[in-house]
Amino acid sequence: MPDCERIVLDGSPLTIARVACVARGKGEVSLSPEVVERLAVMRSKVGALTADGRAYYGINTGFGSLARTRIEASQLRELQANLIRSHAAGVGQPLGADVVRAMMLLLAASLSRGASGVRPVVVETIISWLNKGLTPLVPSLGSVGASGDLAPLAHVALALMGEWPTLDGRTPADAGIAPLALEAKEGLALINGTHLMAGWASLILTDYADLWGAALVATAMSIDAFRASDSYLDARAHAVRFGASTASVAGRLRVLLEGSEILPSHKTNDPRVQDPYSFRCSPYVLEAVDDLVAYVCRSVVRELGAVTDNPLLFERGDGLDVVSAGNFHGMPIAIPLDALTIGVSHLAGISERRVFAILAASDPETHLLPYLSHGPGLHSGLMIAQYTAAALVNEIAGLSSPASVINLPTSAGIEDYNSFGPRGAAKASRAIELAQMVVAIELICAAEGVEFHRPLKSGRAVEGAIARIRSVVPPFAEDRPPAPAIEAVTSLIRSGVFGNFLGSHAALAGE
């Protein structure tokens, strides 16, 4: 990943690549001197607010539906600590360390932009935790994704205070980090924000990029395994569809198949007129998915440059304006996350259909044996691999029901329209995980299918991908458990190795 060794928080937007880099332990974070100075200036003005006798939400009032309750100046520190303690109500299995670290990085970045009124030490403490590999234990369930990701962020803040455990059992003292004592406004600033949703979405999109590369390679490999045509990759057909994205996908598939000996071997004597939709319409389905993901990327990138706190503090002369707004609401990221799962369902679904076609071998023109068995009947071949793919696709279909469309009010009705974006993130993350296994099954079956056409070879890039598969999965000359093979190729997908076989065709999309 580019620019991963040192990431300086200077108020500018983060990038998806940098979030993934820090979240997965490949980069350190620092705070620019200019930001330290800016935070100190803003904090000095927050102090004046606590002494002017007026009510300011979250600074000297209660929270949510208790906002009309005034809090005495002598109790403001206690107010912030109690806020964190009371809001740490998460349940369920812990979030992965990378998700928590992504959330913490986005929290630090948002606070560093100066509109939350926190002291420099608050951001510096978060950065110290990141750099020393100290990760709070954060339960996965409890955020409705509207007033910020309150419960997950409260568990982070409580850990920063030294009152909640870490994933590995270490304490802040073990890492040489002092517990954080909160001042006015700081507790609220730590838990308002879309940081769980947006951080998790960044990781999901990173994993999608690896899945996308593998899906393209699997599609091209299946075309030759099935002895399918390449007529539907003709650039002229996509030009009149007036869709640059379909032309891009078709161009990528053409490059992957470049040099194929299988394609010309049946151009003149193949009685089949057209291929099944899962082959012939693959550029259109994959284009629709990738166009949708481009929209999701734009939505996430916006969040990576945002301040999603409430209230917001803006300088006005020597003082501050305190503006209550809804920047913490997660709908701008919740809807894209829900949409992403729908897209992934189609990427996985069309992959499973090609697996079915290859294993069925119902047309003799495929030159395949049923289930790619070398002794049908005595050997079942890869028959049950398709069952597994079908089960995975079925689960993804269930995950595709949007989380964001079901509203449940909170906080005595003050917070009466919530996004449930964290549930959308969890669904999208699971969908990606399942789709990786579906595409792994297609790669295994397609590689096996191409072997049936030896000595003919597929495209140069496809053959390179087959060689990579063969480095971890030998051919299925006789029956053996497919499970280890599926796991091994899934690991290859997650490593991003199949993106290496896309070659120069990436330029076709202007990348």
Image (cartoon, helix red, strand yellow):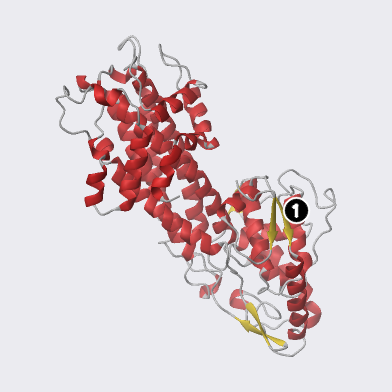
Q: Residue at x 14, y 25 (%)?
A: 271
Give above or below for 435 relative to 29.
above
Q: Residue 134 at x, y = what percent?
A: 74, 49
Decide if residue 395 is in sight here. Answer: yes
Q: Residue 263 at x, y = what percent?
A: 27, 26
| Drawn side of residue 23 relative to residue 437, left or right | right
Residue type for callout 1 = Trp
Q: Residue 473 at x, y = what percent?
A: 48, 20
Callout 1 secondary element: helix
Q: Residue at x 35, y 25 (%)?
A: 458
| Drawn side of residue 272 relative to residue 203, left or right | left
Q: Residue 319 at x, y = what percent?
A: 71, 87
Mark 1, residue position: 129
| Drawn side of residue 367 relative to residue 62, left or right | left
Give above or below for 97 relative to 421.
above
Decide if residue 392 is in sight here. Answer: no
